[in-house]
Amino acid sequence: MFSRRLFLKGSGIALYGAATGAGLAPGWLARAAEATNPSRKKVLVAVFQRGAVDGLNMVVPFGEPAYYQLRPNLALPKPNSKEGSALDLDGFFGLHPSLAPLKAMFDSNALAIVDAVGSPDPTRSHFDAQDYMESGTPGRKATGDGWLNRCLVSTAASTGSPVRAVSMGAELARALRGVNPALAVNNLGEFKVRDEAGASTFETMYAATLDKAMQETGRDTFDAVKMLQAVQKQTYVPANGGKYPGGALGRNLQQIAQLIKADIGLEVAFTDVGGWDTHVNEIGATPAQGQLSNLLKDFGAALAAFYQDMGDRMSDVVLATMSEFGRTAKENGNRGTDHGHANVMFAFGGGIRGGKVYGEWPGLAPNQLYENRDLAVTTDFRDVLGELVVRHLGNQNISSVFPGYSRPRFRGLIGT
Amino acid sequence: MRKLACVLVGVLTLVALAGASSAKLSKQDQILHALNRLTYGPRPGDVEAVEQLGLKKWIDLQLHPDRIPENPVLAAKLAPLESLRISQADAARNYPNPQLLRAIAAGREKMPEDPLTRAAVERMLRRFKTKKGAPEEEILDPAVPLEALVTPAQIKTLRTGTLEQRREVLSSVPEDKWDELAIAMPAGLRGQSMPAASEELRRKLLLMNAPQAMIAFDLSEGKLYRAIYSNRQLQEQLVDFWYNHFNVFLEKGADRMMVPTYERESIRPFVLGKFRDLLSATAKSPAMLFYLDNWESVAPEAANARNKGKKSTRGLNENYGRELLELHTLGVDGGYTQKDVTEVARCFTGWTIRQPREGGDFFFNDRIHDKGEKVVLGVKIPAGGGKQDAEKVLDILANHPSTAKFISKKLAQRFVSDNPPPKLIDKMAKTFRSKHGDIAEVLKTMFNADEFYAQTIYRAKVKTPLEMIVSAVRATGADVDFAFPLANQIAQLGQPLYRKLEPTGYSNTSNEWLNSAGLLARMNFGLALAQNKIVGAKVEPMKWDGTPAEIGRRLVLVDLSPQTLEAIEQAVDKAAIPPPAPVAGKKAAPKPPPVSVAGLVLGSPEFQRR
């Protein structure tokens, strides 16, 4: 049986009775204590690589001769002992050497990779493709909400945590917009009324107002503020020697880790990382150096640090990565690549069965390319995200999360 | 005599209204209500002015903005915003984006002539060529070094000094050196100098930062200055309403160049005109053609012919057709099918835009037009109609009863209530049909309806972020000489201007704006504005004399609720308690900071509604 004390004890929130001096549980805690579902929440973290990462150099199909013909300058050498060659995953695919921290996760069967994955919509517009991937409705522009918001099972507003859904950044991510309350948090420490006297006055004012909608929003707001303030009050030390890199992605993932560990009801989180639109000088002096390499170093280090930091808690959490489309199979004349079609996704945590590259490899021979230029899509991105929604979050209502997505073909990333 | 007539009209209106609804607003409340709904919030003195003029006459004037003399302050504020006045071709040239940069790098385009733009482009080219590899000094490479324009001590002041000190440094540089100063400054210093710079220097600094960002800057500033200062308030509300109805996302590629022209030529002239004209203007606008992809929609057979049997890469694109029916005219339940969407898309093939280097204007390309017969909503459009096919579609849609209803409901949601009474929608839709989509007539019906003055809708709408910020500026009488920071605030509240990605536009109902992050931002903005912490907006502190009740009434124009008043009074009382006398040997307790009563009022539940 679920007891309130147990809940409080197990939660980072126990801290903040002292922090606020009020000694009173906020409205949400009291309400959550009465809730019937005591289980620790499953969490889904989505990482969006904006700008269309070159998936063919992220996960290298070194077993495919056409790869080397299409990319005389850009191709990463086949795995060998030399520096700068691809890191062998399964004898056909290899990781970019800058993703070395993820290699260990793949080898320990933690990291799953899905290749030749993408959107059924043919657009090569960043804007449209990101929009479709975040709304979860390829080809449909007017969808007002995002898939990550829809995958939250609607609960009565009175029992949901005010921090069920968080997107890192000043503006709420498209994927998280919708009817379920979601927070845009640039920085945990800044999520508050900046003037202290003002904060307590506003709290009193909104608690007392007879304007019901304002009262409710005010209550959720101050609950969320207290939770986030309590969470960030203590200096956060990543566990298990996890070391987040200095960039925005590392910082965002660390704050997401902080929120998950505080047990304040987080269910979905979103962060993005940009810079992947490598039309020019994707590589440096060698294919393993330069722009893409630098971006991947940061990316791999941030994901690995999150994995390490979460430790055992990772069994409740799945992190998945995505990017709006891939890049041309053939390199262009500026040591770069242009807008393509299929790409690659990563997932780890929860019940993910890693150590495998999922999907069907369509090949890179001229007749196998999509529109004579791009890696073809053989797995719908909703096949991957949908499986996480159903088998990880336990939301069976896939058709409301991805409207119009009629024939799911889950790849078995998670055992049933 | 005239005054008496006015009063008489007022009384007669009241009598007429009294018969219709028992729960109607008092005359005084009607004025405040109308000001809250037709404007971006009342300024001090507005209620009295409307009272004197008579409410009906004031509304009539707002429906005829050309009869209202414009506030001379506004023209001065808008004067520097050059990118709002030029053609999209000139905008593309004067504010080069990365694509143009690439073209210049490849020798396909000429360097801009304006020396400052040229310097900005040259710098971007160096950065573009080295792509992150080069240190800033190398990319900068100014002809006149920074040290020749300002002393090292002054540079330090610009980095760490107060706003006033930074202002002093910048004003010591003679005007004819401003170009050189902007060119010589590294990025960080430019950012630090911006709030302290004069309008003209600020624009030079911005141009050096990123020329293409100037357009977004000018758009936001222009919109805010008009909302704050224009006497033609309803017109400005309607420009916002219709832009939002025919939403275009500023940051989709070439739309960055096209939006000023779009708003100026396809929206603004028609906001009180005929709906059909608005529909036509948006359908032909390069901004919309690009945003909803119609420019690349090609009849399937034309695409096949061109590719000689190879699998076509371009074909029919239904995006515009779908949103035209669902969002612009009939509404999602307006009685159309997927087949209609496809047929409309076929009619619109060939409605495209010229190459950017040819000005990027609208043109009809018959070669990619679908020449076959189409049937739209049961109406046959014979084969061979060419450009006229789409015009016929627009006729059908503009005259469709679903459109009359959909547009009426949306207007009523914006101006009357989140759930407008069906009776009101029917009245408006009737006017829409009988007056052939005359928007001013529909609005007149709405503003004259009893439903508009019902007690139940009084102060019931939640302000959008734009309305919240602008109404606070207007209520406090703040003087704004740098509006962009306010645009950033609006984005913090959740409504980045011109950057609603989806064609739906922002919601006209309250739910969209009631969320934690947005509410926090409202509270923080209220406090910051009242404490003069918003760069570019100056509030006279003496305005805050008086009791909390008086200040509340001055800003909201109704009495604060007892609950809100009590919370504020408690805070004031608490701050008034003198700190304990210093104990020997210990430092005196700090004096509590003064309570910003005005800031608390601006962040209160009352101020969030209109």
Image (spheres, coloured by chain):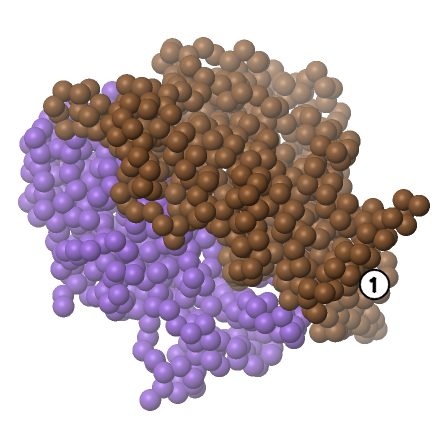
Chain colours: A purple, B brown
**Residue ID at (35%, 65%):** A152
Provide residue B168's location: percent of width, then percent of height: 76, 31
> Is residue B302 among what the camera can see?
yes
Quarter-wise, where is residue A254 in the image?
bottom left
Task: Name the side, left or right, on which B212 lies relative to B144.
Answer: left
Q: Which residue is mark 1?
A: B550
Q: The residue under label 1 is which amino acid type?
A: Glu
> Compared to B589, does B51 lie above or below?
above
> Is residue B157 among what the camera can see?
no
In front here: B119 or B46? B46
Task: Name the side, left or right, on which B11 lies relative to A196.
Answer: right
> Compared to A299, does A263 lie above or below?
below
Provide residue A378's location: percent of width, then percent of height: 14, 45
Quadrant housing the N terminus of chain B = top right
Task: Name the side, left or right, on which B577 lies relative to A24.
Answer: right
Task: Name the side, left or right, on which A199 lies relative to B421.
Answer: right
